[in-house]
Each structure stands twice: as C-alpha cells, then as structure tokens.
Image (cartoon, rainbow, N blue to C red):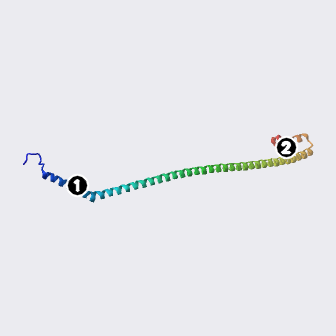
Amino acid sequence: MDERLFGLDIQLLFDAVVNITFILSLFFIMSRLFFKPVREFIEKRDRAIEAEIKSAGVLYGQSEQLRDEYEMMLREVHKEAERLMSSSRKEALLRQEEIIACAKQEASTIVEQVYEEARLEKSSVKDEVKQEMASIASVLANQFVVSDDPFREALLLEDTLKEMGDEAWQN
C-alpha cells in the first residue's frame, strides 16, 4: 500500500460525494415522510395545550368570580342573621319588659286587695270588739244595778277587767 495516512484519491472523493448525496436524499425523504408529520403532531399538541391553558385560565377566572360572589353572599347572610338576632333580642327585651310590667301590676293589685281585706277585717274586728264591749258594759251595768254591796261591786269590776284582758284597754 501507499505510505500515506489515508488514500486521498478519486475513489475516496467519489465515495464521499455519493455518501453525502445519499445522506442528503435520506434526510430529505425522512423529513418528508417522518419529520413533517411529527412536527405537525407536535404543533397540534402545542395548540391543544395552549387551548387547554386558555380554557383553564377562563375557568379559573370564572371560579374566582364565583368564589367572590359566594363570599359576598355569605357576608350578606351573616349580616342578615345578625340583624335578625338583633331584632329578636329587641323583641325579647320588649316582651320581657311587658311581662315584668304586667307582673308588677298584678302584684300591686294583689297587695291592694290584701290591704283592703285587712282593712275590712280590722273594721269588722273593731265592730265585734265594740259589740263585745257594749255587751260587757251592759252585763256590768246590770250587775252593778243588782248589787247593793260595794265590796261585791269591786270584785265584779275586777273580774270583768280580768276577763277582758289588758289588750282591750290598750286599743
């Protein structure tokens, strides 16, 4: 063989040109048959992903809007509940005051009735005491009129006073 490192001759040059031609034709055929459909598939996939991202963005915006509306409605419900609780408390306080006023009025009516009954009882007891005193006085008068003895009159007076007791003379 030659003493060269590699044989740079026409055959090598021809083989290189043929190989480059085959590689370029193979690349061209491959790009037409395989790369172009793969590229289209990837582009379709990218468009689908972008559409999904846009759709997700729209849905996220809608969900944010719905969440805000829900929170606003929840605040309004809380305000309404607080208003109802407040009005219920006011009504309960008014009802409580009415009940207390009614109870006080009934109590004062009962107290007045008790005082009236006590006054009537006191009046009837006074009348009874007066009648009893009158009957005792008439009995005493009869006894004094009948008796001639002054000692006997003193004893009768003393017995009568003992029967009447100290309470009759204090009133």
Q: Is residue 58 left or right of residue 91?
A: left
Q: Nearer the viewer, residue 154 or 114?
A: 114
Circle 2 — which element? helix
* Residue type marked 2: Thr
Q: Which mark is residue 91?
A: none
Q: Quadrant of residue 164?
A: top right
Q: Is residue 13 left or right of residue 96?
A: left
Which residue is drawn at the image coordinates 91% and 40% (left, top)? Answer: 150
Crowding at label 1, few (<14), some or many (≥20) Cα neighbours within 10 Å? Answer: few
On the image, the x and y values in percent for residue 162 come to: 82, 42
Extreme-front residue of the structure: 10
Q: Which mark is residue 160?
A: 2
On the image, the x and y values in percent for residue 62 come to: 47, 54
Q: Is residue 152 above or below residue 36?
A: above
Q: Is residue 30 left or right of residue 119?
A: left
Q: Is residue 63 left or right of residue 148?
A: left
State which mark lies toward you, 2 or 1.
1
On the image, the x and y values in percent for residue 30 come to: 25, 57
Precedes in sequence: disc 2 or disc 1 = 1
* Residue type marked 1: Leu
Circle 1 — which element? helix
Q: Which residue is mark 1?
A: 24
Extreme-bottom residue of the structure: 33
Q: CB under 8 Å between callouts 2 and 1?
A: no
Distance between the alpha carbons at the discs numbered 2 and 1: 160 Å
